[in-house]
Image: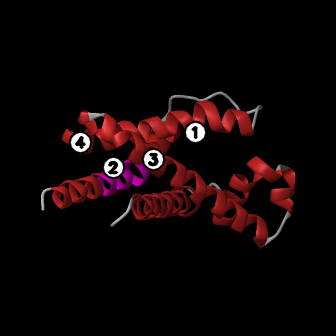
Amino acid sequence: MKSKFETILLSGLTAGTLDILAAVLVYSVLLKQTSAVKILKSIASAVFRQEAYEGGPKMAFYGLLFHYIIALIFAFIYLKIYPYFSFLKKHVFISAVIYGIFVWLVMNLVVLPIAFPKLPPKQFDFQLLLSVFILIVCIGFPIAFITKKFYIRQEQLKNI
């Protein structure tokens, strides 16, 4: 990771991959609530509405594309705020947990309600805790650790 761009790309693609794999594994394979294609089409439906569910593989691809764009945006945000908060530098594990929770809050209290105005109210239950846990592990940790590694490398290069 020689540049900020490479760091954003690596952390965003890693986080996006882990998150979508966790969603498919948990909700499709383990809980058998949906399919991988429906998960991807539901992401696409934020833009394409009902057409996403009626469309073919192209809509699943758009869902995956949107998913990665969102992951890259969260990677960009973390990389940008990292230098301004010494807490992020000193406590990477706790920072990862906090950032995962932050991502969950932004997605569930801002993004999803804008994209889907008629969402049912959230219940404090296993599903909610599971979704927060997934974002902490799959989004918070890779973004926090990859970003920290980048900035440590930048400091080392300055001291040469």
Q: Amino acid at mark 2?
A: Ala
Residue 135: numbered disc: 3
Neighbourhood count class around disc 4 (C-alpha, 10 Å): few under 14, some 14–19, many 20 upward: some
Number of the front mark, 4 or 3 = 4
SS of the residue under disc 3:
helix
Side of 20 relative to 10 (left or right):
right
SS of the residue under disc 4:
helix
Q: Are marks 2 and 3 in contact (CB under 8 Å)?
A: no
Which callout, 4 or 3, points at the residue further toward the start of the chain?
A: 4
Q: Is residue 139 magenta?
A: yes
x and y percentages locating residue 97 in the rendered image: 34, 40
Q: Amino acid at mark 3?
A: Leu
Query: Hey, which quadrant is residue 53 in on the image?
Result: bottom right
SS of the residue under disc 2:
helix
Q: Which residues are magenta?
A: 136-147
Q: Residue at x 29, y 54 (%)?
A: 145
Residue at numbered disc 1? 107
Q: Residue at x 43, y 51 (%)?
A: 139
